[in-house]
Amino acid sequence: MYIRWFKDITIKDVPIVGGKNASLGEMYRYLSPQGIKIPNGFAITAKAYFDFLDQGQIRKPIEDLLKNLNPQDIKSLQKIGQEIRKLIRQTPLPKKLEKEVIASYHQLSKEYQENDIDVAVRSSATAEDLPSASFAGQHETYLNVRGDEEILKAVKKSYESLFLDRAISYRIEKGFKHMKVAISTGIQKMVRSDLGSSGVMFTLDTESGFKNVIVINGIYGLGELIVKGKIIPDEFLVFKPTLEQGYQAIIRKDLGQKFVKYIYDKKGGIKEIKVNDKAQVRFCLNDEDILTLARWGVLIENHYSKKNKHWTPQDIEWAKDGQTGELFIVQARPETVHSISDYNIYREYTINTKKKPFITGVAIGNKVGYGQVRIIKSIKELSQLKKGEVLVTKMTDPDWTSAMPLASAIITDEGGKTCHSAIVARELGIPAIVGTKNATKLLKTGQEITIDCTSGAEGKVFLGKVPYKEKTYELKNIPD
């Protein structure tokens, strides 16, 4: 049997169904009864992926290609990644697997009383969503997939996505062995958030690690645009202690810039359209929805903290169905920066200058960075980035991840606190300033700049090298 339904999966099944699917199963089993809505679905196991490699006789050829890989050379990475993906593309899925997938898809369609229901096909790696590695956006998700043939195509594509350039280099950086990691493909009923809204929710403040707030980001349409950073989402802050006492504990609402959204394409898949002017100046969630999501966030965090016997803050994806008005949770994973921080060490950065900042934006992290500017207009120019330079671009996406560790800091024109650049910069521990609007126009390659993320929410870029001090405190040694 290659199929496991969500009701039969728990968090212990990461080796069988990967991080995403194990978490969905855990929540479906234990948190649905507590009122959290999770769309049903099933996982194709990691064994199916390994059998696909073995029956197609491509395991050895892939291993041989990986032996010739030079991880320092982006061109070598691109060439080998391409060859492995081609091998996977040309290899048929085992017939037994095809049969089981189609039968399960028909069963899911029947449960939702439709012929060919719309599903999300998600790639869930068996090393994924560990507190030390988020794999954020490393593998592909395919939305609004319908019909037997399209489902099987998407499953094959999810196998290919294990060998995207970015996924290969991420595994190298995190020390995972390529052939030990498998893909389990999750197939889950879609929420019609293309007609409603969607977003992400963190059960802590993503910058400071402060435990007592829930941070909710939201946009219209499907949630992929948040990570892509093309728009600045609405942001809502809820205070946990008073929420748990029954108060309407919303402490802040910031209106984003929601110019575009992703909706279903009639031909299958998704497309981008403009958001009308009236909707742009409205929040994508009402207060009741904000509070419901925040309560669910607390329930999910408490469930995992109790299970792990230590605080386990969560990074959660939510969606609101525009047809029914219902809210759903479609994913949850451990937050990967603050949950593993060493809270006994505190570093404080102070910068000394009377200069006016040349550019400002949203600060990510609380450090100071320095280096020469390298403007990168597209992924084709990424190999020009040298170690220690400041990467300045319109926006990064998961394909850029392999080069980002070289940068001393990152500056983008677009994006908010939960865009791709922000997530990766936090994980790498480098300062970033996102949403500057025009850094790529104002800065020039080769300029020396200093990036200051030490003074709260606003990040500042100064021309030249500005002196700063770094002080480390050992909190273990503080007297009572």
Image (cartoon, rainbow, N blue to C red):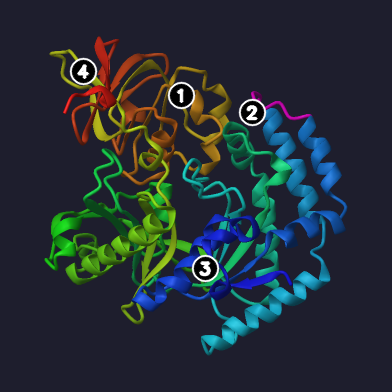
Amino acid on which disc 2 is placed: Ile
Q: Is residue 119 left or right of residue 222?
A: right
Residue occupied by mark 2: 74
Looking at the image, tell me whether mark 4 or mark 2 is earlier in sequence order: 2
Label 1 vs label 3, nearer the camera: 3
Is 221 placed left or right of 452 in the picture?
Answer: right
What's the magenta region? 68-74
Residue labelled with disc 3: 25
Q: Quadrant of the C terminus?
A: top left
Assess whether mark 4 and mark 1 are in contact (beta carbons under 8 angstroms).
Answer: no
| Residue position marked by numbered label 1 in the rendering | 407
What residue is pinned by disc 4? 350
Does 142 appear above or below 367? below
Of 334 and 410, the residue lying toward us: 334
For the residue labelled by badge 3, is the local secondary structure a helix, a strand or a loop?
helix
Queried whether the magenta region covers residue 73, the answer comes back as: yes
Q: What secondary structure do most residues of the magenta stretch adopt?
A: loop
The residue at the point 51 percent across, 43 percent down is 398
Calculate the distance from the C-alpha at mark 1 to the C-alpha at mark 3.
Answer: 38 Å
Counting residues from the start of the chain, the first of labels 1 and 3 encountered is 3
Mark 2 and mark 1: Cα distance apart in space:
15 Å
